[in-house]
Amino acid sequence: MNAPEAVGDPVLVFNASTRLSGISLNAAFSLISSWAMMLSGIPVVQLVCNSALKPCVLGTDRKTPQKSPPCRSCINQSKAAFDPENSIWINFMKDVDFDHELNGLKMDALERFEYGGVPLGRLVLPSLRWILRRYHLEDDSSTRILCADYLRSAWSFYVGSSRLFNERTFRAALIFNGMFYPEAILRYSAMQAGIPVITHEVGLSLKSGFFTRGDATAYPIHLAEDFQLTIEQNQRLDDYLTNRFRGNFSMAGVHFWSGMESISGDLLKRASQFKQIVPVFTNVIFDTSQDHANVLFPHMFAWLDQIVDLIHKTPDTFFVIRAHPDETRPGKDSQETVADWFEKRGLDKVANVILIRPDEPLSSYDLIQRSKFVMVYNSTIGLEASILGIPVLCGGKARYTQIETVNFPSSQQDYMQMASQFLNAEKIDMPLKFTVNARRFLYYQLFCVSLPFTEYLEEDPYWQGYVFIKDNKWDCYLPQNSPILSTIVEGIRENQEFALCR
């Protein structure tokens, strides 16, 4: 009612994989951004699932894949949130010929499946790994059925979205994540049609969103060479790090620790028997960021397998393998864990290595400060170790490997050679620019491209990761009254970076 007359082609908004009923963080980012665009005169069209996904990702019961998703509550939420005059509802379209092509295929063929020139298998694979909580998918009937269902829905959605882009023109498409299969399909078809795509994900700071024209889960950031921290910015970063090092932080609305514990006397006593300590920090294998990380190694466990050789070859080094705390998050617990890998490799019987399980609140930062160097795959803690002045050897492409912050070799062979050199060196020289760049990058990531929606959102007290929208006056959503919303609207309108620091 308070929006001016809309001018020009609309922005298409889609986020089917971030909520069912209720409002998740990313659903809130999308909805509030839509309001800001409309209040600035940019028309918005919501693309809404009308039981078009059989099943959607969040509506999948991984223990009973054939169970129908909760479409009714999701559709009711969509009707409550979106203006019916500016919504396009998309339905499932059955294709008998397509179904015939799937008959009898094993998982390896389903993962590589293409139809009509569209790499559907590749586009649904991250969703399968995420919902099944594993990287290596089992070739059993349950997994094959779920994969086939995702492929059918993906093809139906591709046909529907391609038809839409042939019939209408859009200024851009604003899409959650871009990796879950419905959003991946829409992104693929939009790019085929020449429509600019903006993806968004949860940012690094509290209740913040990250928006980009690239892959949101890869976190592409343009950090200008002349961007240097002021005294005030350095202090702001130090205040954040103080809380972080105490374990006082959350990610995507999830609080991992109530506090952190220092290294126990027993662990210190065991470590004292060795010449040096090298922590190894892992990631959650099914996370959508892993597709971007797997550059040197096929996957994280392949990297860990190579580290096993180093463990056996350097018995004077105490390796501490730290499993990621998100591996045991309730409702999202990994089915392919570092603990399982550790036991299968027989490392529980090896003297110079120990596993710190994901639910152990041992301070990783205390461990880092006692280490010779740190090995990570693509964990954020690699960036923090550089800030602490400890050399880092990175096995996967990380957000921060965009600039010189850590050692990230160009090949698997170079990685293993550098690891051996570090283990055998009396002293490892760490360039000062690594620490300086790490501070610059982390500040930019926290306070420039993580756009805080705290003014508009409060946490749902019962459902982690979900939020309520505050009862603000309508003019709070005018872009001219908010640097956050202005950044988003101008980023869409003027093709600018979605950053507060320019």
Image (cartoon, rainbow, N blue to C red):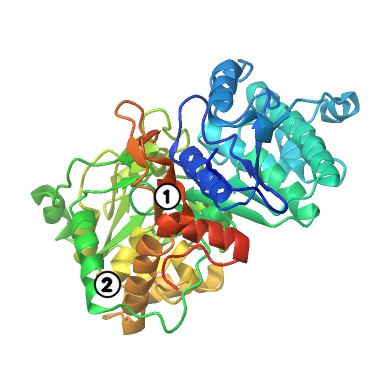
Q: Residue at x 52, y 42 (%)?
A: 2
Q: Secondary structure at mark 2?
A: helix
Instruction: Check disc 2 and report the residue beneath it.
Output: 233
- The part of the image, by quadrant, that contains residue 107 is top right
Q: Residue furthest left?
A: 265
Residue 493: where, in percent of width, then height?
A: 61, 61
Asked whether 227 or 487 is in front, the reply is 487
Q: Is residue 345 left or right of residue 58?
A: left
- Looking at the image, is mark 1 or mark 2 nearer the viewer? 2
Instruction: Check disc 1 and report the residue beneath it.
Output: 283
Q: Residue at x 59, y 16 (%)?
A: 72
Q: Amino acid at mark 2?
A: Gln
Q: Residue at x 14, y 52 (%)?
A: 263
Q: Amino acid at mark 1?
A: Asn
Q: Earlier in the sequence, mark 1 or mark 2?
A: 2
Q: Is residue 303 left or right of residue 91?
A: left
Q: Residue at x 68, y 27 (%)?
A: 53
Asked whether 213 or 84 is in front, the reply is 84
